[in-house]
Image (tube, rainbow, N blue to C red):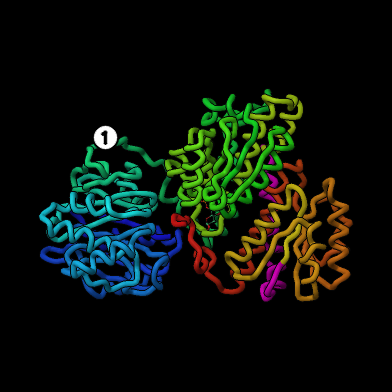
Amino acid sequence: MCGIVGYIGEKNCVPILINGLKRLEYRGYDSAGLGVLTNNHSVVIKNKGKVSLLEEKVQKTNLSGKVGIGHTRWATHGVPNEINAHPHYNTSRNLYVIHNGIIENFRTLKKGLEKLGYVFETETDSEVLPHLIDSFLKKGNPLFKAVRLALTEVEGTYGIAVVYEGEPDKIIAARKGSPLVLGLGDNENFIASDVSAILAHTKQVIYIEDGELVEVYKDKFIVKTITDNEIEKEIHEISMTLDEIDKGGFSHFMLKEIMEQPETISNSIRGRILFEKGTSRLGGLTEVVDRLVNSKRIIITACGTSWHAGLVGEYMFEQFCRIPTEVEYASEFRYRNPIINHDDTILFISQSGETADTLAALREAKLKGALVLGICNVVGSSIARETAAGVYTHAGPEIGVASTKAFTSQLVVLALITLLVARRKSMSQVDGRAIAEELMAIPDKINSILRLNDQIEKIASEFHDANNFLYLGRGYNFPVALEGALKLKEISYIHAEGYPAAEMKHGPIALIDENMPVVFIAPKDSTYDKIISNIEEVKARGGRTIAIATENDNGIDSLVDYTIKVPSTIRMLMPILTVIPLQLLAYHIAVKKGLNVDQPRNLAKSVTVE
Ligand code: G6P
């Protein structure tokens, strides 16, 4: 998704902006650009494709300057090309704007501006911004006021940064619905859509909220509301380090993140298990725990992989907390005027904490008076800040677009919440301890699965030329089937579907032939015999089969073409183990196909537009 970085200070901003854009690459983008104020003029350089291409282009120009803005664009309106890339500018080419988000009323604004004589070059919605701001500058307003007044006419979402030759001592930035952070340095300041873009320079940040604008100078800043009231802001210290967002010797972020899971899960659990009492301690929920325990219903709302984690959460909450639980896509929830009662708890799961649909669903639920809780990975993200309470997953920065370690940490947090609530209800201390013990053993068990990496790579060699894949699982492992299929399609572009195994007979079985690989998630549990029957049905139709099975299950080897064995654990935690081989399988298939694993085509890490 689009990324913003801006610099004002004493240094040459060009390398700072380029490196900042490289840090934002993981979000997914299709073009990039810079706008730099130099001594007596300004320069814009844009390019379709990677930031490295933009860098080559910039290097040929000897461009330098002390104020500048940079952008990675992920196309929404207008194809990805150089002209549609940001920054966009006014007709005099002395005012530059970068924009994340979508301007919903851009057609109306554009018509009005065209009547005033403004000529548009691009197919984007964003281009209305420089012209609109220009129209307010022409009425004699200073830049800050011109931006503020322009934004009062804008409907939709934005995170923007603006520079203007006429007032070269400042950057104006503003936010409504797209994340924006101000980084504070020594005689220099930064703007970014994501702290990773500026972390190399500062750890002191201020989160700009919706409806706020900031006037950033090299040595000071002023934050105001869109209604022109100045506001005091709190400075936050970022604890994340640069090392944490580097590849650490792995060929891809995704592989690093898969391999990190024993550690990230330990981090999610650390300090949160009260073993003697057979329960958990979640500081973020202390204030709301009574309301949560007494909820008549829990609705889990999320998108993508986080939605799959929610499905596992549903099984956990209903089995152990005995609270009716529903899971809904945030995009559906927000638009269907859901029935929400005061004794409902609505749980929002989001790695980034910035997903537009999840954030909008959260605001809708809040409005209707439910208890709104978050499970987020990015500390200080919008969803984390706007929920009444919540639990961080502590998985560390996830850079690979396909979510891996964030998913398993979400499952761990859901298990910890289950323990907390169930123990306040009917779960015994002995049962609570048994779950706690199994949770604590998960990191070691994942280590043993990761040792199967070479075996999984070999299986990937057999299947990387497949055109379709089917993933089947039951109960707790049905969401794992969905997640395994999602991982494969995201990064290998192989069509893959996840199904509850029993549903196979109601459609997918028609697809089975010798060209259709079927992955069964088949641990030894109460539905094992049923899934074995499903395996037989696939074999009878010539399908190629891979089973994710439990370590002591020798019987399954002769039934399937390939088995990947994982240690056993209790049913509720099994998805944390069974998903790991599926992450590795998808990874190796994508690598064998020579694809860009960390930045798959058309996908974005953080989907901040609808
Ligand atoms: C995008 C990402 C997915 C992610 C989904 C939800 O589609 O590519 O990996 O699962 O958004 O993101 P969130 O940050 O809310 O978990």
Most frequent secondary structure within the magenta stretch: helix
Residue visible at 63% across and 44% down? 411
Residue 210, quarter of the rendered image? top left
The answer as to whether callout 1 falls within 8 Å of ligand 1 is no
Query: Is 278 located above or below residue 13 in the figure?
Result: above
Describe residue 561's horizontal placement relative to residue 91 as left or right. Answer: right
SS at circle 1: loop
Is residue 593 highlighted in magenta?
A: no
Horizontal and vertical percent position of residue 254? 55, 59
Instruction: Residue 18: tell me if it is visible.
Output: no
Residue visible at 30% across and 71% down? 46
Residue 211, quarter of the rendered image? top left
Horizontal and vertical percent position of residue 82? 33, 74
Describe residue 582's horizontal placement relative to residue 232 as left or right. Answer: right
Q: How many marks?
A: 1
**Depth check, front residue: 163 or 145:** 145
Describe residue 299's horizontal placement relative to residue 171 as left or right. Answer: right
Q: Residues within 10 Å of mark 1 (few under 14, many from 20)?
A: few
* Pointer 1 residue: 232
Q: Quadrant of the N terminus?
A: bottom left
**Depth check, front residue: 590 or 206:** 206
**Depth check, front residue: 419 or 555:** 419
Horizontal and vertical percent position of residue 476? 73, 47
Residue 467, quarter of the rendered image? bottom right
Q: Which residues are magenta?
A: 440-469
Residue visible at 20% across and 56% down? 11
Q: Amino acid at mark 1?
A: Glu
Instruction: Residue 289: tell me if it is visible.
Output: yes
